[in-house]
């Protein structure tokens, strides 16, 4: 009880909570506590929890202001937070008290939690990683602030049409009041777009940027509580608003539409999250306005964030040259790269530093995390667009490039190809700014997100930069996930069993996840194994109930649950999975009932969204949905194989799916998935992994042991050769992979409805096969067979499951964030004193 009193401003018992709940119902919500529905009760509970967060948040910020430690700023266009109430209560140590309190008032906590909408301000892995890192920063008492955008609409809601097509609907998540944020209507900055940049003639290198559009950025602060600590960090999200309400001249002339036009264009900047991941090729095809708005989002957010960071620094009274000693800025992918020329602009044009002084500060402040090596996904911006929207920044980018290329020329005289490869500007019509090059040369350190990926960064996309700057600038920080949300919250029973078994307090091992290794001693304990298996079974039943209530479908729970949940993308190869399912179906169909009865029963789950303009990804969804329709209705096979596409994948849905999985699939073409993070979540929850030798799968296998994972497929070094063979020595698919050819032919022939519909998808495999399905299909089917065999020995399977969880300590985001803090940012833990 002492630690609880210590971590909250005020200690609370159940009666304090019910009082606060009733009080909020009456005064904040203007409703009667006895007359609340579940949603109202959720709101009242959230407001009660918020009061405690606020006390801690204030103390934390005051403590930082007093001690003035170096801080890190995590700039991310995406924070995929999911729900907050359960996490806030867990971290505050008030879960039990709240459960009891709402029960006394006639409510069920689980039902209330379900009423909260996800904050879905992200696409997938990159956005969820940012959310895990905030949780770990606060939990480890590291002074980190997040900076992002307060989108009015998060990632679109996914609907599935009767034909099986993905439809997109808006996600107006702010429809109801959001108890987790504090509007800071007094914290505002002006951000300029367009206008003219006039270089001064005094030789100082300075310029005057004026005119154009000015937009206001308004701060909204989201409280980020740490687990079992008072530390409550901040996530600052910017919302755009017009500088002036509307244009009075037009208004007075009676032209009301023109009067509000510019204010509408200001509000548009933070209206919607871009739903594309890994698809800048899609962006290149987008209408110019679409691209321009994304560029404006990026600049709006980086300019407001930098102004805020600089203002905080200046309040300390330190000289500007000390800035890198007090601020480290982590760039989450290239999306915030404009912060580099923006800081140069401020230091040169406003602080009147020399170019060299400014560049010194910049290159000691920024750190860049790369999340992809797919060439088509590297961010580039058309020079004419940048010139139009940000004329001064284009000048600065050209100046950076000039000094940079001079230095390269000096080190590698006469190597013109190298200069062209390394230039910040890619030649072409139009010319384009290569954001990864700019992020790299403007940063102190560059890192990838898993060992293999970081090595690929060093040897492929940034090879020239390693040769120029030296390898020590290019590191690795393997991703991690927060065990609070991804074990304790989503799988409470397993967490309790672990606590009971290890005889270590939960508040200790949840922050020191290597302690899980103690579970190894219990793999031979039959009673423990039975409890472990029983929890997995109840998690499957929970998922089945969820599917029953949300979709009205009956899932059998006496089967292996096989799950692939992630954004739809050709490189992630959901297509390989669904073709494998069809292969299994054809095999089952060809069997006698007696043969079939010996087979492993299996339920296959898919979930994931496709970028709205990604035609092939959408066609893959359509195929999955229609295969499911046929398979689930087939009386011969339906006891042995069921298939579900669960619509509208989200953080909350993941929290139900992951604990229920026996096996999950992470089957990207080798060398394409930078890390993956759901692989870590599944394994942490005792699900086994079926995957390729890619991303963090490799490090998971290193930890849990190769005999506890199922690997298949070609390795990264083979990929280039195989693609070359596809291009220059193609072998007909019937010859190369007859099993796959048969599956494709059945689809074409209409086994799952109009076969013609799927031809564009099937042709990506028949011709070119860039992601190597024809090369990996046979070994994939063999790996699936090994999974079936292993599952038939249930006792051995459970042992594998326990060993897997036991060895997942490395993949806590606490470990990852401490690596950033120690090796990159040079930050110290700063507990609230
Ligand atoms: C870029 C330009 C314009 C519009 C959108 C974008 C954009 C948005 C989101 C590009 C990429 C993303 C998201 C990328 C992402 O989620 N990458 C994943 O990051 C994870 C965390 O490091 C890794 O585990 C995954 O392997 C990686 O795919």
Image (tube, rainbow, N blue to C red):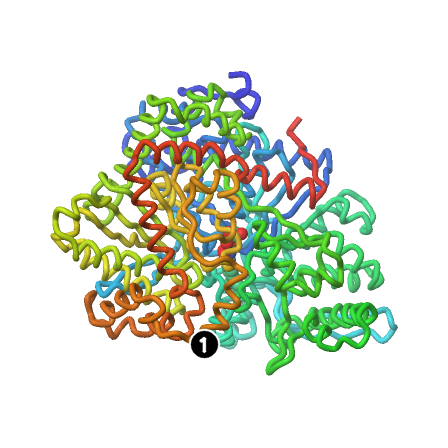
The residue at 71%/76% (across/down) is 417
The residue at 49%/34% (across/down) is 807
Whether residue 13 is situated above or below residue 533 in the rendered picture: above
The residue at 64%/37% (across/down) is 142
Residue furthest to the top in view is: 1
Which quarter of the picture shows residue 243?
Answer: bottom right
On whether ligand 1 comes within 8 Å of the CB at mark 1, the answer is no
Viewer-closest of 591 and 232? 591
Which quarter of the picture shows residue 37?
Answer: top left
Task: Give left or right: position of 247 versus 437.
Answer: left
| Residue 48 percent across, percent down from the top left | 44, 31
Task: Give left or right: position of 181 versus 461.
Answer: left
| Residue 606 percent across, percent down from the top left | 32, 53
| Residue 385 percent across, percent down from the top left | 60, 75
| Residue 101 percent across, percent down from the top left | 36, 24
Residue furthest to the right in view is: 202
Secondary structure of the residue carrying numbered label 1:
loop
Residue furthest to the front in view is: 735
Task: Give left or right: position of 670 versus 597.
Answer: right
Quarter placement of the C terminus: top right
Residue furthest to the bottom in view is: 429
Q: Which residue is mark 1?
A: 729
Would you say residue 78 is visible in this rendering?
no
Viewer-closest of 249 and 226? 226
Label 1 crowd bin: few (<14), some (14–19), many (20+), radius 10 Å = few
Q: How many marks?
A: 1
Whether residue 55 is situated above or below residue 391 in the rendered picture: above
Task: Give left or right: position of 400 versus 353.
Answer: left
Viewer-closest of 312 and 773? 773
Would you say residue 688 is visible in this rendering?
yes
């Amino acid at each position: 009880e002492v630690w609880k009193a210590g971590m909250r401003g005020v200690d609370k018992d159940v009666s304090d909570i019910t009082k606060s709940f009733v009080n909020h119902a009456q005064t904040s919500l203007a409703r009667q506590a006895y007359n609340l529905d579940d949603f109202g009760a959720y709101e009242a509970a959230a407001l009660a929890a918020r009061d405690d967060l606020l006390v801690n948040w204030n103390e934390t910020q005051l403590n930082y202001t007093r001690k003035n430690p170096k801080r890190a700023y995590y700039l991310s266009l995406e924070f995929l937070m999911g729900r907050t109430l359960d996490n806030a209560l867990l971290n505050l140590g008030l879960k039990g008290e709240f459960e009891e309190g709402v029960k006394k008032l006639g409510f069920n906590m689980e039902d209330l939690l379900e009423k909260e909408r996800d904050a879905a301000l992200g696409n997938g892995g990159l956005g969820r990683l940012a959310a895990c890192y905030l949780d770990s920063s606060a939990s480890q008492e590291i002074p980190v602030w997040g900076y992002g955008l307060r989108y009015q609409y998060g990632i679109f809601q996914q609907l599935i049409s009767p034909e099986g097509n993905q439809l997109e609907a808006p996600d107006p998540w702010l429809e109801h009041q959001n108890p987790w944020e504090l509007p800071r209507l007094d914290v505002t900055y002006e951000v300029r777009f367009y206008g003219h940049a006039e270089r001064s003639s005094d030789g100082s290198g300075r310029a005057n940027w004026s005119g154009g559009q000015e937009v206001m950025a308004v701060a909204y602060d989201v409280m980020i509580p740490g687990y079992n600590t008072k530390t409550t960090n901040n996530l600052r999200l910017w919302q755009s608003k017009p500088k002036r309400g509307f244009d009075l001249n037009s208004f007075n002339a009676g032209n009301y539409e023109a009067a509000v036009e510019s204010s509408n264009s200001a509000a548009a900047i933070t209206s919607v999250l871009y739903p594309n991941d890994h698809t800048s090729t899609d962006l290149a095809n987008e209408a110019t306005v679409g691209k321009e708005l994304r560029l404006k989002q990026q600049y709006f957010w980086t300019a407001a964030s930098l102004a805020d960071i600089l203002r905080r620094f200046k309040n300390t009274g330190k000289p500007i040259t000390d800035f890198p000693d007090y601020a480290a800025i982590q760039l989450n992918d290239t999306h915030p790269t404009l912060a580099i020329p923006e800081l140069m602009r401020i230091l040169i044009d406003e602080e009147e530093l020399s170019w060299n002084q400014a560049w010194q500060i910049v290159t000691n402040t920024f750190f860049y995390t790369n999340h992809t090596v797919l060439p088509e996904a590297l961010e580039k911006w058309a020079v004419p667009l940048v010139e139009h929207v940000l004329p001064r920044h284009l000048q600065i980018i050209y100046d950076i490039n000039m000094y940079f290329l001079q230095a390269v020329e000096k080190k590698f005289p006469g190597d013109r190809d190298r200069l062209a490869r390394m230039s910040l500007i890619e030649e072409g019509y139009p010319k384009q700014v290569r954001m990864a090059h700019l992020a790299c040369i403007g940063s102190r350190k560059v890192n990838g997100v898993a060992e293999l990926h970081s090595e690929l960064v060093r040897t492929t996309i940034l090879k020239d930069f390693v040769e120029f700057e030296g390898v020590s600038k290019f590191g690795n920080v393997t991703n991690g996930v927060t065990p609070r949300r991804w074990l304790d919250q989503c799988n409470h029973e397993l967490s309790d069993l672990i606590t009971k078994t290890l005889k270590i307090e939960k508040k200790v091992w949840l922050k020191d996840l290597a302690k899980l290794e103690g579970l190894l001693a219990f793999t031979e304990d039959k009673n423990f194994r039975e409890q472990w298996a029983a929890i997995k079974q109840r998690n499957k039943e929970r998922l089945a109930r969820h599917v029953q209530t949300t979709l009205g479908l009956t899932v059998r729970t006496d089967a292996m649950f096989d799950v692939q949940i992630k954004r739809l993308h050709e490189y992630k190869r959901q297509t390989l999975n669904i073709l494998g399912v069809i292969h299994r179906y054809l095999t089952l169909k060809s069997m006698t009932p007696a043969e079939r009865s010996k087979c492993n029963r299996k339920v296959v789950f898919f979930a994931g969204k496709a970028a709205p303009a990604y035609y092939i990804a959408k066609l893959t969804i359509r195929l999955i949905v229609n295969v499911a329709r046929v398979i689930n209705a087939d009386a011969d096979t339906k006891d042995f194989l069921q298939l579900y596409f669960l619509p509208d994948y989200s953080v909350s849905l993941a929290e139900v799916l992951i604990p229920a999985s026996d096996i999950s699939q992470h089957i990207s073409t080798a060398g394409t998935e930078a890390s993956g993070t759901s692989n870590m979540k599944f394994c942490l929850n005792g699900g086994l992994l079926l995957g390729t030798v890619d991303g963090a799968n490799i490090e998971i296998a290193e930890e849990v042991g190769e005999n506890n994972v199922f690997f298949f497929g070609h390795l990264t070094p083979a990929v280039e050769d195989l693609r070359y063979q596809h291009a220059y020595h193609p072998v007909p698919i019937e010859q190369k992979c007859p099993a796959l050819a048969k599956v494709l032919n059945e689809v074409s022939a209409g086994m799952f409805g109009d076969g013609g519909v799927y031809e564009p998808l099937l042709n990506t495999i028949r011709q070119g096969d860039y992601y190597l399905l024809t090369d990996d299909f046979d070994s994939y089917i063999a790996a699936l067979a090994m999974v079936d065999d292993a599952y038939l020995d249930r006792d051995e399977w459970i042992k594998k499951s326990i060993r897997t969880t036991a060895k997942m300590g490395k993949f806590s985001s606490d470990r990852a964030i401490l690596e950033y803090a120690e090796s990159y940012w040079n930050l110290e833990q700063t507990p609230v004193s």
